[in-house]
């Protein structure tokens, strides 16, 4: 579990408790309510040590004392005030800037982590057994630091981040061997800096700090998105939070329609960034046609948009979404490529404690639409369009590569299976429909050639792509002769792998 998610969960618990207290009186503090409050305080006490929230400990001690004595009106008012102070302290932690560091044990990063945390950053030091892509998407870091290793996992991750468009939104530092050719290549692809493994922690600390300041200044001074002219993510989120508070106080309806353009990175590669930008602007023009003067929208990231719609029922919003979807699909003919989006819809309820609650639910529906084949809109009870999902089986004992690949292709809408050995892969293959197998050539207890032979005995039609660090032509020829359909060397380009997979799917 992400540590900042635990802080956010504690924050939501405190809000729920405060809302409950505001609706009750001191006579309603039953045993179960006090138990929930105590458990929340215990979690807060642990988190206060981890995040150095010294101010919050005093409030927790005061609340604990109040729970031990007979509750009267005076104590009840004091209890609410203490909880409000706790809420404010947690908000200050949640507002800290995040830095993600991908490394498998370099002690210099521990020093860097300590320096950044003293400066007020939340640092997520990720390595083995960590889902780095999910971490990045969940916490939206200010800066990412990627260290390459002997298996080129860092460069693989960097290429995936580049292909997903993350390089255009988040500054990335790459740490690798002292190789000028590699340095130039990485910088040309969008990294803000490349340092050798002998880097100085202090130097990197100040570079991160300075670029974070520049990024903050740029974002805070930007109300409108430069490409589309609609609200930027930061301003749109501020506006959404304010509207949520207004509706919670005055009453009313608030719907969130989150949509993500499908395969825009591939369209940009195929048609060029200029055409891709033109498509985005045309789509935004379509979105705006269906919004009233009360509604608004903002651009969350390159291909993702949030439409905030008032006064309509969820069924009405789904109907609007279907009309928008049909009109966007009609752009496909003009650009000679499929243009579509996936969407998720949610809405305010009496249980919603913040705009983030509605946003998170819409995001879950969006992910469901992506996983189930894209070009769909999911609401709480309805969905648009059905497609058969293609299935991929990844076989690799490298947990980092496995995590990157499974996350990437699950988000692209494929049904994903994974195995760390040939035996496990054969078991999965025997019990499921698999369209393509993507396998390493070297695996525990079973060589790649033996695995390919056994797969071919079971099924002669399934497509097999070998991913391997072995570049020897003899190995490549042997794999292809045994029945592999394709062979890609590591570190591989995610775009190249996308193209091979799509070729075989077609």
Image: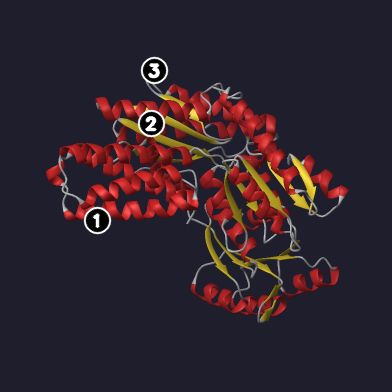
Residue 495 is situated, as x and y percent measured from the top left of the image, at 69, 49
Residue 171: x percent and y percent? 67, 39
Instruction: Name the residue at the right extreme.
Output: 180
- Mark earlier in primary sequence (3, 2): 3
Which quadrant would residue 140 be assigned to in this image?
Answer: top right
Residue carrying label 3: 293
Tell me if residue 39 comes above or below residue 206 in the rendering: below
Q: Element at badge 1?
A: helix
Q: Residues under labels 3 and 1: Cα distance?
A: 47 Å
Pointer 3 with pointer 2, Cβ within 8 A: no
Q: In this rendered view, identify the residue nearer to me: 268 or 221.
A: 221
Rendered-image quadrant of the C terminus: bottom right
Q: Which mark is residue 451?
A: none
Instruction: Look at the picture and state if 435 lies above or below 187.
Output: below
Q: Disc 2 and disc 1: Cα gap in Å?
A: 45 Å
Q: Nearer the viewer, residue 13 or 200?
A: 200
Query: Which residue: 70% across, 34% down?
Result: 272
Q: Which residue is mark 1?
A: 35
Q: Which residue is mark 2?
A: 320
Q: Secondary structure at mark 3?
A: loop
Q: CA distance from mark 3 to mark 2?
A: 15 Å
């Amino acid at each position: 579990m992400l540590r900042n998610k635990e802080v956010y969960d504690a924050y939501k618990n405190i809000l729920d408790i405060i809302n409950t207290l505001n609706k009750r009186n001191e006579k309603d503090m039953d045993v179960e309510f006090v138990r929930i409050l105590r458990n929340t305080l215990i979690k807060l006490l642990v988190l206060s040590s981890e995040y150095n929230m010294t101010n919050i400990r005093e409030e927790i001690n005061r609340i604990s004392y109040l729970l031990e004595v007979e509750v009267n009106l005076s104590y009840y008012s004091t209890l609410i005030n203490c909880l409000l102070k706790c809420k404010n302290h947690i908000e200050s932690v949640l507002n800290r800037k995040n830095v993600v560091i991908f490394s498998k044990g370099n002690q210099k990063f521990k020093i860097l982590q300590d320096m950044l945390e003293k400066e007020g950053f939340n640092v997520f030091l990720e390595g083995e057994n960590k889902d780095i892509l999910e971490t990045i998407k969940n916490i939206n870091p200010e800066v990412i630091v990627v260290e390459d290793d002997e298996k080129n996992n860092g460069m693989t991750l960097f290429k995936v981040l580049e292909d997903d468009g993350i390089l255009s939104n988040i500054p990335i530092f790459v740490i690798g061997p002292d190789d000028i050719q590699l340095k130039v290549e990485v910088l040309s692809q969008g990294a803000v800096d490349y340092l050798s493994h002998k880097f100085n922690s202090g130097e990197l600390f100040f570079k991160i700090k300075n670029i974070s300041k520049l990024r903050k200044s740029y974002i805070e001074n930007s109300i409108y998105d430069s490409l589309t002219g609609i609200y930027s993510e930061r301003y749109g989120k501020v506006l959404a939070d304010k509207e949520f508070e207004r509706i919670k106080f005055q009453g009313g309806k608030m719907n969130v329609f989150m949509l993500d353009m499908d395969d825009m990175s591939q369209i940009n590669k195929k048609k060029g960034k200029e055409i891709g930008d033109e498509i985005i602007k045309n789509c935004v023009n379509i979105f705006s046609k269906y919004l009233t003067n009360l509604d608004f929208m903002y651009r969350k990231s390159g291909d993702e948009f949030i439409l905030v719609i008032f006064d309509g029922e969820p069924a009405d919003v789904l109907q609007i979404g279907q009309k928008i979807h049909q009109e966007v699909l009609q752009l496909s003919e003009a650009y000679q490529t499929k243009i579509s989006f996936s969407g998720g819809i949610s809405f305010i309820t009496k249980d919603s404690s913040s705009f983030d609650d509605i946003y998170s639910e819409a995001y879950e529906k969006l992910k469901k639409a992506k996983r189930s084949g894209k070009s769909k809109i999911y609401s709480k009870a309805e969905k648009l369009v059905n497609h058969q999902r293609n299935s991929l089986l990844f076989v690799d004992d490298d947990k980092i590569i496995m995590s990157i690949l499974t996350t990437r292709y699950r988000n692209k809408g494929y049904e994903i299976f994974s195995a760390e050995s040939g035996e496990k892969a054969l078991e999965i293959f025997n019990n499921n429909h698999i369209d393509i197998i993507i396998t390493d050539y070297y695996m525990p207890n079973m060589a790649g050639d033996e695995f390919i032979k056994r797969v071919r005995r079971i099924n002669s039609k399934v497509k097999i792509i070998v991913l391997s660090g072995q570049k020897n032509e003899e190995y490549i020829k042997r794999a292809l002769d045994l029945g592999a359909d394709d062979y890609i060397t590591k570190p591989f380009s995610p775009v190249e792998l996308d193209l091979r997979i799509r070729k075989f799917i077609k």
